[in-house]
């Protein structure tokens, strides 16, 4: 049986919204969590191959076991990868060591880190926004505002609607994604893709959304 992404929420309270989130560290401790992929996200590889993003200072939010962080470092990005699960971060450090790349790994809650880290040229998450929006979208947008500056890019990979999926994988409609992230960013590119995981090799429908914070021309 495939593992579920989270338990069904209780209704009506903030506690219920938090229960939409998995117990991240516990799920890593149990082995391979349901979101874990055999390698870097194929869509990220494609975006880099297409040259849409040039090497720069990048912040990865919720890097998990580091497959995407290692890819970015191999492609010349200066990577800061933040993760709150000690087990995931330990695995990410080993992966980076095996790959022979230098990455600044930070074991911290991203909302705390975001208060003092300053702005990055690129912010990336694979599977963070689609959870964060369920609990407190405003808090997540405030974080994105703090860690970017005018001209910064934000790339997110987020679950897309798929009625055949009933295992708790988060799903965001195109309209919600454009509306929510459009409060801070201009959409550069929104593509449909698939997220392949160990537990679901055929993959989940997902969005890869590249956005940019507008540069305001002062008169
Ligand atoms: C859905 S997983 C995705 C992990 C990774 N990006 C991947 O694709 O495998 C979300 C990740 O965010 C981490 N996370 C959750 N809340 C966090 C927080 N407040 N600060 C930092 N990391 C967090 C979790 O531990 C988990 O590794």
Image: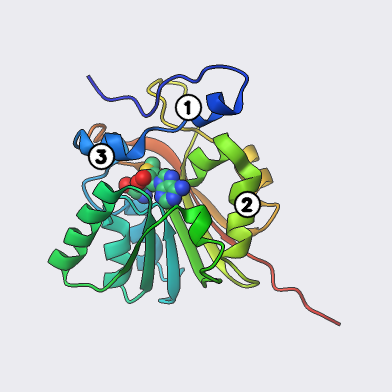
Dot 3 crowding, Cα within 10 Å, few <14, some 14–19, many 20+: some
> Observer-nearest residue: 91 or 2?
91
The number of numbered discs placed on residues in the rendered structure image is 3
Would you say residue 198 is visible in this rendering? no
Q: Is mark 1 within 8 Å of ligand 1?
A: no
Q: Which residue is mark 2?
A: 141
Q: Quadrant of the C terminus?
A: bottom right
Structural distance between the alpha carbons of marks 2 and 1: 20 Å
- In the shown orientation, is residue 18 left or right of residue 217? left
Would you say residue 116 is visible in this rendering? yes
Q: Which residue is mark 3?
A: 28
Dot 1 crowding, Cα within 10 Å, few <14, some 14–19, many 20+: some
Q: Which residue is mark 1?
A: 19
Structural distance between the alpha carbons of marks 2 and 3: 27 Å
**Sequence-first disc among 1 and 3:** 1
Q: Is mark 3 within 8 Å of ligand 1?
A: yes
Vertical arrangement, residue 71 with respect to residue 111, above or below? below
- In the shown orientation, is residue 17 left or right of residue 55? right
Q: What residue is at 26 percent from the left and 44 percent from the top?
A: 37
- Residue 65: image location, x then y, percent: 26, 52
Tell me the tag on residue 64.
none
> Observer-nearest residue: 172 or 80?
80
- SS at circle 2: helix
* Of marks 2 and 1, the one in the foreground: 1
């Amino acid at each position: 049986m495939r593992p579920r992404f989270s338990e069904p929420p209780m209704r009506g309270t903030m506690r219920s919204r938090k229960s939409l989130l998995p117990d991240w560290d516990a799920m890593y401790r149990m082995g391979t969590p349901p979101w874990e992929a055999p390698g870097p996200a194929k869509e990220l590889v494609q975006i880099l191959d297409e040259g849409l993003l040039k090497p720069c200072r990048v912040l990865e939010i919720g890097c998990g076991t580091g497959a995407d962080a290692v890819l970015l470092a191999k492609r010349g990005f200066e990577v800061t990868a933040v993760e709150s699960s000690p087990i995931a971060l330990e695995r990410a450090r080993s992966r980076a060591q095996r790959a022979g790349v230098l990455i600044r790994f930070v074991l911290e809650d991203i909302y705390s880190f975001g208060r003092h880290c300053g702005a990055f040229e690129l912010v990336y998450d694979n599977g963070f926004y689609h959870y964060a929006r369920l609990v407190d979208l405003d808090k997540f947008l405030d974080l994105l505002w703090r860690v970017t500056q005018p001209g910064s890019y934000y790339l997110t990979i987020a679950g897309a609607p798929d009625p055949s999926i009933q295992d708790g994988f988060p799903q965001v409609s195109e309209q919600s994604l454009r509306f929510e992230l459009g409060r801070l960013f201009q959409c550069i590119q929104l593509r449909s893709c698939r997220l392949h995981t160990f537990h679901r090799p055929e993959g989940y429908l997902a969005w890869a959304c590249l956005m940019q914070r507008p540069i305001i021309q002062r008169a």
